[in-house]
Image (cartoon, rainbow, N blue to C red):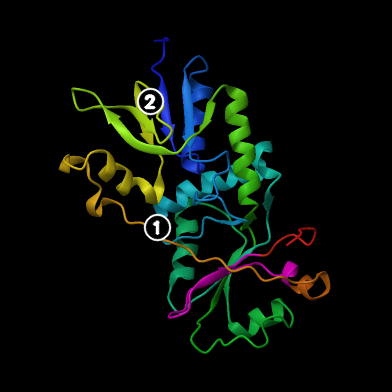
């Protein structure tokens, strides 16, 4: 053993990569290994995506505080800022969420370029784009010009590159099961290729696959099973192919979050230079 315990992190999405990066930065001499089923970025990771909304606009003030810390990295850290675009964000809903968000900013002492506007004023602000939008179920619209979006996959690749450059070992291998010692503690993994990878500490950053991995690895260990502690979810993504002429209007509007039931969703634009 080295002076620092060895660590095996399973899953190279944003949680796994971030954990590996911060561990190696704090303990440069440690042996830290990151493993996922493919070369990075794994397209099955939730953080693999064309883009993600970057915002702190939430009703939960604790979550909002953490998001505000992350936003600062997106804006100012050279590793992340190259992928961040401050387009603004709007939220269409028929609740008091927007007003609650503004109150949270006030409680936290954060100055933000955000406001609630009427649908009529909102249409004036963004030209003719929303002329045919049905606002019959919508109250005032929350607008935050300080929010935006990030090129998620490119950022994840850069983050993984930085972790590897700092000393993290990356392994592409499909995990069969977790392995356990005589004391019941997890000792590592057995890959489907038959390789046994061990470490002093094992961290699962396996997202929606966590419950199945544990169930397959230790079916008789009821105390380890996920049960209702973790619920897998899914997001359906649709991509519309627009030519530069017709797509230009989409580059001039903020990220749009539509929260009026039964239809819910988000619209995030690409940069005009992207190929589809």
Left-right relation of 264 to 54: left
Considering only vertical position in the picture, is 273 above or below 203? below
Q: Judge depth for marks 1 and 2 and give the one in front.
A: 2
Q: Residue at x 66, y 67 (%)?
A: 254
Q: Residue at x 51, y 60 (%)?
A: 57
Q: Between disc 1 and disc 2, whose residue precedes?
A: 1
Q: Which mark is residue 148?
A: none
Question: For residue 267: magenta?
Answer: yes
Residues shaded magenta: 250-268
Residue identifier under label 1: 60
Which quarter of the picture shows residue 78?
top right
Residue identifier under label 2: 196
- Helix, strand or loop status at disc 2: strand
The location of residue 193, given as percent across then percent down, is 43, 33
The location of residue 233, given as percent across then percent down, is 39, 60
Category of crowding for the residue at label 2, using alpha-carbon neighbours closer than 10 angstroms: few (below 14), some (14–19), many (at least 20): some
- Helix, strand or loop status at disc 1: loop
> Would residue 144 be visible to someone looking at this image?
no
Residue situated in front as seen by the camera: 18 or 108: 18
The C terminus lies in which quarter of the figure? bottom right
Residue situated in front as seen by the camera: 79 or 243: 243
Residue situated in front as seen by the camera: 148 or 121: 148
Which quarter of the picture shows residue 54?
bottom right
Total numbered labels placed on residues in the image? 2
The CA distance from mark 1 to mark 2 is: 42 Å
The location of residue 262, given as percent across then percent down, is 43, 81
Q: Residue at x 66, y 46 (%)?
A: 154
């Amino acid at each position: 053993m080295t002076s620092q315990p060895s660590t095996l992190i399973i899953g190279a999405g944003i949680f796994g990569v971030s954990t590996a990066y911060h561990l190696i930065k704090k303990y440069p001499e440690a042996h830290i290994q990151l493993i996922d089923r493919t070369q990075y970025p794994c397209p099955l990771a939730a953080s693999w995506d064309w883009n993600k909304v970057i915002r702190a606009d939430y009703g939960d003030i604790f979550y909002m505080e953490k998001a505000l810390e992350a936003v600062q990295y997106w804006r100012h850290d050279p590793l992340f800022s190259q992928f961040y675009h401050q387009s603004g964000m709007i939220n269409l809903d028929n609740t008091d969420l927007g007003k609650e968000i503004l109150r949270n900013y006030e409680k936290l002492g954060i100055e933000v370029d955000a406001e609630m506007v009427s649908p009529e004023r909102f249409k004036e602000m963004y030209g003719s784009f929303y002329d045919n939008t049905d606002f019959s179920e919508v109250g005032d619209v929350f607008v935050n010009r300080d929010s935006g979006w990030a090129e998620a996959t490119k950022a994840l690749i850069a983050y993984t590159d930085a972790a590897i450059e700092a000393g993290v070992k990356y392994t592409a291998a499909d995990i069969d099961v977790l392995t356990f010692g005589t004391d019941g503690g997890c000792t590592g993994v057995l890959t489907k290729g038959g390789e046994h990878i061990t470490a002093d500490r094992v961290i699962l950053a396996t997202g929606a696959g966590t419950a199945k991995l544990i169930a397959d690895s230790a079916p008789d260990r009821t105390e380890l099973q996920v049960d209702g502690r973790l619920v897998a979810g899914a997001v359906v993504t649709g991509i519309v192919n627009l030519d530069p002429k017709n797509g230009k209007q989409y580059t001039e509007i903020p990220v749009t979050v539509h929260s009026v039931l039964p239809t819910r969703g988000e619209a995030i634009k690409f940069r005009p230079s992207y190929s589809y």
